[in-house]
Amino acid sequence: MSVEASTPVVAADRRARSRARFGEASRDRVLSIASPVALFMLWELAARAHWIDVRFFPAPSSIAGTFGTLIANGTLLANTLTTLERLAIGIVVGGVPALLIGLAMGLYRPIYAIVDPLISATYPIPKSAILPLILLVFGLGEASKIAMVAIGMFYPVVINTAAGVRQIDRIYFDVGHNFGARGWAVFRTIAFPGALPVIMTGVKLGAGLGLILIAIAEMVGAQSGLGFMIWNAWQILQVNTMYVGLITIAVIGFILTVLLNELERLLIPARTRR
Amino acid sequence: MSGAKIRFENVEKRFALRDGEHVALGGVSFDVRAGEFFVIVGPSGCGKTTLLRIAAGLDQPTSGRVTIAHGDGDRPENAMVFQGESIFPWMTVRDNASYGLRMRGASASHIDSVVGHYLDRTGLRRFADAYPQQLSGGMKQRVSIARAFACDPEVLLMDEPFSALDEQNRTLLQQELLRIWDETHKTVVFITHSVDEAVTLGDRIMVMGADQGRPKAFVDVPFARPRSVLDLRATPEYGPLFHDIWAQLKDEIRFPSAEPAA
């Protein structure tokens, strides 16, 4: 009786609390949007009042103008597509072997014993430092750009995949064996899905690293791409164009993160569906 | 009586330790009859899980062998219900329950009808598209049971499937298991440390000694089937049987020296 009587009170209380939480969430969202807007306004103001040197920090409104020009004459789109193409190919070229090697490393101890020291020894080398070597080996064409992205993608994915498979509870492999899973079926039904949350973290890291590396690679020995556009703008002192390139790369990074989060949600329904 | 469905012959399992050797199973021999619900009860560390894992082909014996008689058809030799959480967290209830059939390349229509049947029998139909994280411990073990029954093995091996559940859930699942088992009368080897569970479920109970996993006694359980888990406990035969098995086990359990051995 008393339990029944108290139920609506509890429900009302919970509603009130969730409303409070919703209020906090929307307040936080407003703040998150307001802070960059405020920064841009401050920047615009500072530029117009000449508190800052507009040769280095042109007003956002003037950068927006350059944005329009570069979109209109097709330069921005061409360079963006070139960079995206290199990024996409590099992610696949680096990511797929990393995934397969990582799975094999996680599943078979001898393979881990053979490959792990090679990865551990080469991983600490800054990826940007091997650009000259890559240029030497792959030349000044597309291959060297793709190779840089692939290297950036490879390490986080291979390391996370191997670690992800190794942390899967042994019992799941026993279950697989007991119910007749052999070879490829073990990869497909246990090792891969079991390691997927950890693999996705590696993919996000690798894609981010790939974006950093493609920008660097395009600055040296390239005639196209956003990295080239930024570098070239510096050389001919078109500061506005440089900012357009920077903002475009930042937007690509942001969209990449959103897309990968969405991919993660699709691939790992167990973790996100409640 | 039908012949031996599972034959354990001189099954021996030794583990190398730093200071010598541990004998988990020192030459165990016994038969399990076809269609029998065979329960192994024994103290912790008596080697009963090792025995079951060897029967399942998950571990190899140091010497000796386990043979499972094959009927006609291409059914899998065994399917195991594991102790603790063993259903894949990344698959839905339906995909977990159909796992064995899918690995054996069964047709989609066959999988649908068989898995549908066992999802109904275990009360999981409503949760077919749910993921394990949304289920209670009892529900997860139901999935594990459905998975094992669905692939229609020659023998079912169950390794303390209910040991992690609370008493009410355990009683419920025991009853459900008996109900499902009554439909098929599959040969079962069921491991438990609970005497009560052994008496409730089994046709025959093997009491295992703590020393080198030797069978200490075989006890026939006289209760008729189908059984009711609750009514069974109220019968006059239940008490003496429970007592007898406990008496066999008592000597095998090492009590802490400070406490009286009662």
Image (cartoon, coloured by chain):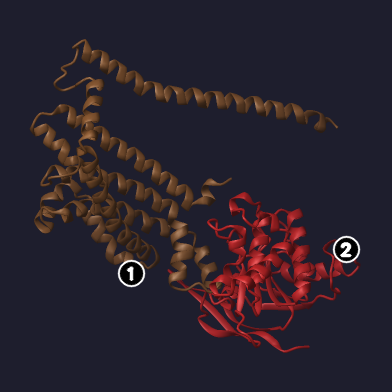
Chain colours: A brown, B red
Estimate the x, y position of residue B199 in percent, counting from the top left.
79, 69
Q: Quadrant of the rendered structure where residue A89 is? A: bottom left
User: Looking at this view, is A149 or A73 the one in front?
Assistant: A73
Where, by quadrant of the figure, is residue A107 drawn? bottom left
Q: On what subunit does the disc labeled 1 rest? A: A
Q: Residue at x 74, y 26 (%)?
A: A9
Identify which amino acid the numbered label 1 is placed on.
Pro
Rendered position, A10 above or below B160: above
Q: Is residue B52 left or right of residue A231?
A: right
Where does residue B57 sit, x and y in percent of width and height?
A: 54, 77
Report the residue marked by disc 1.
A110
Q: Quadrant of the C terminus of chain B?
A: bottom right
Neighbor class of circle 2 (other Cα within 10 Å; few <14, some 14-19, many 20+) is few
| Residue for badge 2 | B231
Q: Is residue A229 above or below residue B239?
A: above
Badge 2 amino acid = Asp
Label 1: few (<14), some (14–19) or many (≥20) C-alpha neighbours in 10 Å: few
Q: Residue at x 71, y 69 (%)?
A: B251
Quarter of the image that includes the N terminus of chain B? bottom right
Residue B210 visible to an observer of this rendering: no
Residue B197 visible in the current orientation: yes
How far apart marks 2 and 1 lie (CA) works out to: 56 Å
Residue A233: numbered disc: none
